[in-house]
Amino acid sequence: MIKILIVIILVFASTFLGIIIGHYETFPYDILKQTKIILTNKNLDNESMNAQLYESDIDSLIGISTDKDISEKRTSLIEYIWKTKELPSDSDLLFEKEIIDSKYEHLKNLQNIDKLTISMEKDVNSISYLFHSKISNGNLIIYHQGHGGDFIRGISTIQIFLNEGYDVLAFTLPLLGMNNQPIVDVPNFGKIKLTTHNHLKLLESDDFSPIAYFLEPITISLNYIDENFDYKSYSILGISTGGWTATLYSALDERISDSFSIAGSYPIYLRSDPKNFGDYEQTVPELYAISNYLELYIMSSYGENRKHIQFFNKNDPCCFSGNSFISYEEPVKNKISQLKNGNFQIYLDETHNEHKISKYVTDKILEQLITD
């Protein structure tokens, strides 16, 4: 009887401990996660083989042959998102100069921080920080965090660019980090608190697209910065859906010279794996019927002194792992060559087994920025 009781206690304790480790990601969560990656690595190495199973006629999916095609698609996307032919120029923006935030006081080469708060449709807001470097090179880089939460999670990346003299404008995705989660009254559905991006699809109407929540803060911020600062260039980088944001935004706004997406997106035909399918914003049929991902990659790359660079983590436990990108890499590069204006590249990061921006990536980004 005592032996049975001991077994029951051990089973209960093990189960409880497993729940705690999984929920709070305490020791030895990282070891277990890495062990899983190693044990399943053969599946990741077969990504290129799996890509062949889903291979489409890539060239037939690209409806861009001229710069006019790009211009027309850009206008159509803007019309879909903002119901106007041009990027928005007016919004409710509060600019607070030289704020104090103790979380960032230890950053090196930091002169001060400005805070930008933008209010949008249905009182959804966006809070971003503009980090000014003490010794500046005169260029601005936009950093966009993904679903991981607040841009504090990207503090090491922000520090790297401050070290190199870049000012950094840091954003968090809608409804995350310091951004609010308002309660909205949705016709025919009632009141709901917006806590996930999948809630946003409920707000879609003939007069409004929730995709604006992801992009408008960048537009309005750059409009203000255009009027009040004098930067030589604007670049953007992001991780996960922050990388998706970098891709889509740079396709719409030619003020962005260089865009860098880290584990940000795949074309729809490579998203059969549920972990790659993505939230609402990554799979809106009406949006990607105007410009699919392949076309967005081209639009982000196209233009004088413009480039779009993608990074994928080979053993990413989150999404877009492996090298399935080889199915579209050359077709997109070939299209850019035909257009004779722009630059598109992809790098595979094999230096770690995490969903993150590594030193390998930041080194490559700095190399690309220096060559401009």
Image: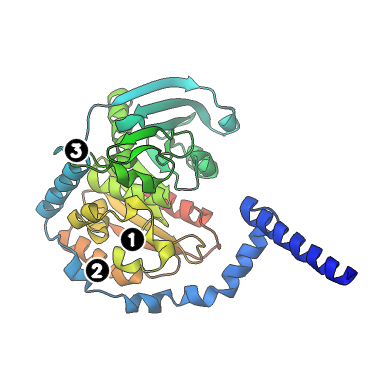
Residue 151 to residue 334: above or below:
above
Q: On the image, numbered disc 2 is attached to which residue?
A: 331
Q: On the image, numbered disc 3 is attached to which residue?
A: 207
Instruction: Find out whether the residues at labels 1 and 3 contact each other: C-beta distance under 8 Å.
Output: no
- Residue 310 in view (yes/no): yes
Residue in the image at 58% along x and 32% along y: 103
Residue in the image at 47% along x and 51% along y: 362
Q: Which mark is residue 109?
A: none
Amino acid type shown at disc 1: Gln
Q: Which of marks 2 and 1 is in front?
A: 2
Q: Which class describes the residues within 10 Å of circle 1: few (<14), some (14-19), or many (20+)?
A: some
First in sequence, mark 1 or 3: give its number.
Answer: 3
Q: Which residue sits furthest right?
A: 2
Q: Give the spatial CA distance, label 1 vs label 3.
A: 37 Å
Q: Which mark is residue 345?
A: 1
Across and down, in percent, residue 106 comes to 60, 32
